[in-house]
Amino acid sequence: MTATSNPIVYPPIITSLLDNDLYKFTMLQAMLHQFPQTHGVYRFRCRNNQDTDYPLGTIKEALEQQLDSLCQLRFLPDELEYLRSLRFMRSDFVDYLELFQLKRRFITVSTDSKGRLIVDIEGPMIQAMFFEVFVLAIVNELYFNALSDPSVIKEGQRRLDEKVELLHDYAKRQSADNNQADHKQEKIPPFIVADFGTRRRFSKSWQAHVVETLHKAEPDIVSGTSNVLLAKNLEMTPIGTMAHEFMQAFQALDVRLRDSQKAALEAWVHEYRGDLGIALTDVVGMDAFLRDFDLYFAKLFDGLRHDSGDPYAWGDKAIAHYHKLKIDPKTKVLTFSDGLNLDKAWELHQYFKDRIKTSFGIGTNLTNDMGLTQLNIVLKLVECNGQPVAKLSDSPGKTMINNDTYLAYLRQVFEVDALD
């Protein structure tokens, strides 16, 4: 007999389907109710392959095992009960989730000749779209597990302690501003930060530690998280509305391409009737978005989310647009979520606080600030119903599509100049 070594068995990283970002649930509900037969193709990409400490392809076997475990999970009764407690989650959708289970056949993992990791997801969007955050969190944790040691955790804790001190300082400054405003009978919008770091976290346990630490330090500032499981366990506010994939899908649904943004916004309004009213602006660029964001939508939505481009110029454009529509910007909110840290968020808050309300979603810098080179990984929708779809980001390098002809057509239709 030939001796064979037993394969390494990795403990499951994802142990709850609630360990996901809220907008995956909100988009899934809208798709299930309005476009349940939509088919999607997603592609994985590491934007900084050349900077990794070792080839991502080496985690292929471990990732395969993790996906096998993930596809065994079902929602537990207490998790379903929590989802029912959110007023924007409809009872029929939670009933659907009671039966929900991710199907392994819709996701494949491979490597290329350079040792780069390849992940492909193809299937009904009501299945395919739910994989993304899980896969990115698993890839991060597997990758960084090999680099972790006590010195890394110590450095991460040192940086977390610095963030706590920063929050205490911002709280004092905000209190002083509020006292001064009381004398002038003015009201200054609060500085609000949410954790958006599930997809790029160092590990599941580290994210939980970071979020709990910051929330306990300054609960009035760090009051929310995009991670639904953490929101449930820590009694925080779950945060999230829509992602690019929701808007992109409408490029391939039964509407004119030029009307796809308006159709997506209309579908969102139809689904949520005033809840979850933050619109994402950079699927085809801010200028093209504002051409579609007329008085009707500007009144229906509570505000806008920034995820690419110069945040100051973007915010100024948004405020000018509200003024143009004769809407008081102080009744609206701008949410910033692109590559932020606490310092950048505070500076943006100071710049805009006298003109409009702000909130901030911080991801990697909260949950993976360990002194190591961070992975810049994404898993994006690239096809829908057999047709290419794309995002025309306001930042160079974020557009992800292999069809140059469609990209050129999309730019032409929405009058967007090339940045990449």
Image (cartoon, helix red, strand yellow):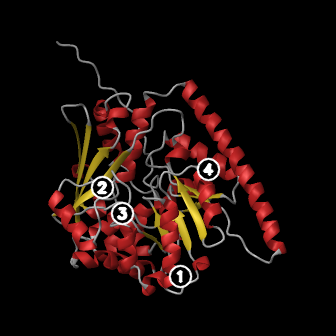
As drawn, is 109 to the left or to the right of 199? left
Q: Which amino acid does label 3 sit on?
A: His
Where the N terminus falls, by quadrant?
A: top left
Query: Looking at the image, is mark 2 or mark 1 earlier in the sequence?
Result: 1
Assign a secondary structure to mark 3: helix
Identity of the residue drawn at 61% across and 77% down: 330
Query: Looking at the image, is mark 3 or mark 4 earlier in the sequence?
Result: 3
Q: Mark 4 points at which residue?
A: 343
Q: Are marks 2 and 4 in contact (CB under 8 Å)?
A: no
Picture coordinates of residue 344 (x, y %)? 58, 52
As drawn, is 339 to the left or to the right of 217? left
Up-down: is 101 above or below 153?
below
Identity of the residue drawn at 81% across and 68% down: 180
Q: What residue type is labelled 1?
A: His
Q: Mark 1 points at which residue?
A: 323
Residue in front for this viewpoint, 247 or 107: 247
Q: Inspect this view and state whether residue 82 appears.
A: no
- Report, in whole angstroms, how far the alpha carbon at label 4 lies from the one at label 1: 28 Å
Q: Mark 2 points at which residue?
A: 399
Query: Looking at the image, is mark 3 or mark 2 earlier in the sequence?
Result: 3
Picture coordinates of residue 405 (x, y %)? 15, 61
- Report, in whole angstroms, how far the alpha carbon at label 3 lies from the one at label 4: 26 Å
Q: Name the residue under label 3.
A: 244
- Report, in whole angstroms, how far the alpha carbon at label 2 lies from the one at label 1: 31 Å
- Report, in whole angstroms, how far the alpha carbon at label 3 lies from the one at label 2: 11 Å
Up-down: is 262 above or below 115?
below
